[in-house]
Amino acid sequence: MPVTHITNEETISKVHLPETAITFIDGITTGVISTINAPGFGTIDPASYVLVDVTGRSTLSIQTNSTWTVATGGLYPQVSIDGVNWLDLYQTYPLLDVFDMDYDSYIYSGQKSIWQIDVTGYSLFRLVAVGTTLTGTISVAFRTTAFTKTNNNKTRCSI
């Protein structure tokens, strides 16, 4: 497709942009992790993760709220489409720490912060505790956000 360059005011006055309404949908889920999985994952203990449905969502915010430590490990992000097969995301550094604006591969032992991650196209997201020992319990809060755009067939401006 050729690129069109706008070179004068007459051309600019004829562009049509539809009016769009944007609706935001939010949901909050909380949970507690009370046990840990050995490195290498194996069978995942249900008490070692917090799960959230992200169907139709675009952004997930994650907050850890308690005093906890994991020896040689942390909280690892995983996603699934079917709820059976899980993909580990930690190798892609998907978690944006909103306090230092740096990307993390997983949530390190004892961190208290808020992270954001793109979950577009997935059905489920979970944080899994992996390491050798867990001290304390890990309180996790998830906030999922989605938005929809609706075109009401009106033209706001034209080029």
Image: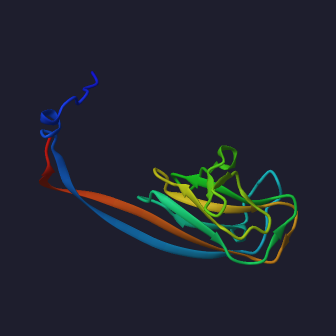
Which quadrant holds residue 134?
bottom right
Which quadrant holds residue 112?
bottom right
Q: How many marks?
A: 0
In the rendered image, the quadrant that contains the C terminus is: top left
x and y, in percent, of residue 105 in the image: 70, 51
Left or right: 109, with 113 as reference point = right
Q: Which residue is outermost to the top?
A: 2
Left or right: 95, with 34 as reference point = left
x and y, in percent, of residue 60 in the image: 53, 62
Q: Which residue is outermost to the front?
A: 9
Q: Residue at x 65, y 44 (%)?
A: 92
Relative to 31, say whether 51 is above or below: above
Closer to the camera in the image, 18 or 128 = 18
Closer to the camera in the image, 97 or 37 = 97
x and y, in percent, of residue 116 in the image: 57, 60
Which quadrant holds residue 19?
bottom left
Q: Residue at x 38, y 68 (%)?
A: 25
Left or right: 110, with 31 as reference point = right
Relative to 102, say whether 61 is above or below: below
x and y, in percent, of residue 76 in the image: 70, 57
Query: Which color scheme does this rendered protein use?
Result: rainbow
In the rendered image, the quadrant that contains the N terminus is: top left
Closer to the camera in the image, 50 or 72 = 72
